[in-house]
Amino acid sequence: MASPFQDSSIVSLLKSMHVDTDENSIAKQIFQIRDDLCFTWNHKDSVVVAIHLDRPGVKVQQKVSSQPIITKLVPTDTPLFNVERLTVSPTGRWICLWGSRGATVLAVPSRSGKQARFIGSSDQDGSVTCHSIPIAERFFLSNAKVAIQQADWHPGSADDSHLMILTSDNTIKIYNVDVLGHSISSPGGSSLEAEQTLPLSKRGDMGITNRSGVFSESVVRSSLGETAVGFAFAPQVQDETSPNLWPVFILRGDGSVCCILTGLGKNKPLKHRVLGPLPMLPEKEDNYGLDSCAILCLHPMISCPPVLVISTSNGTLYHCVVLHRSEEEDSGDVDDDRIETASQYSDWSASVFDEDTRGDLTLYVYESIELELSLTSKTSSKTDASRFPIMLHADPTSPGRYFCSHKAGVHKVTVPMVADLSELASKPDETIMKDGAPVSEQSSVVEHLVCTKLLTRSTPAPILGLAIAFPPPRLMCLMNDYSLIAISLTGTRVGEPQPLLSAQTSVGGSPLKKYNQMSSTASKEPFDRHIAQILKRNTSHPLMRAPPTEDLGPQECYEILSRSLKVMRDEYLTKYEKARKEIEKKTAALDARKAQQHMSLSRLMSEKFELRDKAAQLSERYEDLKDSGDNITSRLEAVLSAIQRRLPVNSDAEVRMQRQLQEIDRKMKDLSNGKENSNQSVCT
């Protein structure tokens, strides 16, 4: 089935959205796919364009025309700010349009009919008016120096209506956009106010006493890197007093991370407490960078310790595991520390957010990755680090994979540590205490998918949005010129397959099965994993998409060609050649083993025929011996019978017969005497 994004009407519609302004010089996220709908913000018309995608197994486009359904969602109040992000709620009820100077929420209309069209959509231009809710519009208009750092939907909302916003004055505000009785803000009215306000720092602790107040304080905090720049939700935790708590990790510009517990409605904590800055181990002088810009939390399951990803503007990524330092660890008690570590891997809620250890969270940085921001040397790109803020996107199809989008392109990062922690969390504490917690030897795999900054001096073409379309999983990239690039995410199988039922051991198992299991246990590494390790690339060749205005000279084209050839030679051809030699070596070894097994098989077949002939001979001899034994047995019976007849002593049967005859003779005599007595009586 062809992708609807390849339709000419979709391509022409996206091309018509392109506007040559200075606002397109920064990376954005105005493109998102939710279920069977693709939402894109049209800056030219100030509308949200919804494209209906074909759902697998469901035919929603039962019409004569084969063109996809396109609907324009027109907000009742046009946003007065520059829209930089488009965030759709998990259930698709709401769309949040936000930028640094404001936020607006759109209520997505319901759909009905065989084609699942929006209710109230016009048949002429396919537009429908949507109710829009401005978020704290008056506050942002009156506070020009307060900007929105991040906005995201709270995962703990039962009705999918709570929006959490982080502002540059180190404040988190939670809004309920589904409040009954809320009306559209009028010119003389007010917009939606916050349901909860969580300050992350105390006002006035910087010693600012002039008239500018919070503005000067925010400027000082920003210059010192103490302004919160992003947040990420951690797995849900359970508490006796509040059963539905969601930890939120907050990243500051200086690289420090804080944590705060959030809840909604009756589940919110009685007192909000900011934990941190959390210590990062091993310690470094620069605290792992002073220009952090984004944070992402990876967690495949609730009980698994999360993995935090921290990105900096110079293209460096840090992977951290969140645990807590217990008293036993500080005192050096190894056994107790192993027990505490086992409990952390098995139950995230009970070990990390316990009342007694709620202030001892620690980030263990185990890996750092430097992204390639251009096809030339990396050192020159570091000189202008502030130009490359990185946005992190989680992959909904794989918990251990995420994407990085920025002005220079797109990267894909695969983190094996997430799968290792998930496997450890599924094991009982006794197993971890006995075997310990092994550290993964596999490093994260980074792939450069799209490059829009070919040279260091080149003008980058920022990415306007990333989205995952599946099945099959494909990464959709909205480029600076509003063209779409589809990159397949279907790769080779990662991890071991599920064991077969026949592979399970039992007490009465066959010796051959036990031998195979012992051989597989003794083997060092599977051959397919060995080949995959050889073919593992340290540098990938991205898809190059330079801006249309880019003018490359012959020398620059030669540099790009040389770099591409070097990557193809070092990362592809050389490794393919090495893998070919390994496969040939393995094939030769298997051929030798096959020839040896053929020789053993022929020897076994000859021995089989010899044993079969011996078995036939033994069978004939057995039949002869059996006939001879039967003959001898019959002769012995005849001899014993003759001997028994010639014995002088009566046998038991003869004695019984004699007694019976004597008894019969006595009875005959009694009968004769009785008869004679009867005759005499009659005569007289």
Image (tube, grey):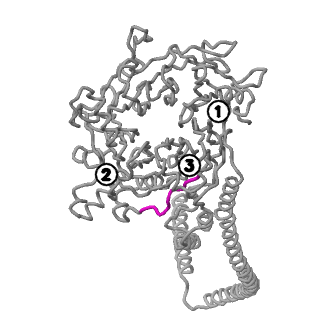
Magenta stretch: includes residue 446: yes
The residue tagged 3 is: 412
What residue is shown at x 71% (from left), y 73% (from top)? Answer: 584
What numbered label is drawn on residue 362? 2
Mark positioned earlier in the residue sequence (3 or 2): 2
Task: Give the x, y percent position of residue 112.
Answer: 61, 17
What amino acid is labelled 2 in the image?
Thr
Q: Image height check: is 419 above or below 520?
A: above
- Is residue 371 or residue 647 the one in the foreground? 371
What stretch of residues is rendered in magenta? 439-447
Q: Residues within 10 Å of mark 3 (few under 14, many from 20)?
A: some
What amino acid is labelled 1 in the image?
Tyr
Helix, strand or loop at label 3? It is: strand
Examine the rendering and report whether any part of residue 668 can be seen.
no
- Is residue 237 or residue 359 the one in the foreground? 359
The residue tagged 1 is: 482
The mark closer to the camera, 3 or 1, is: 1
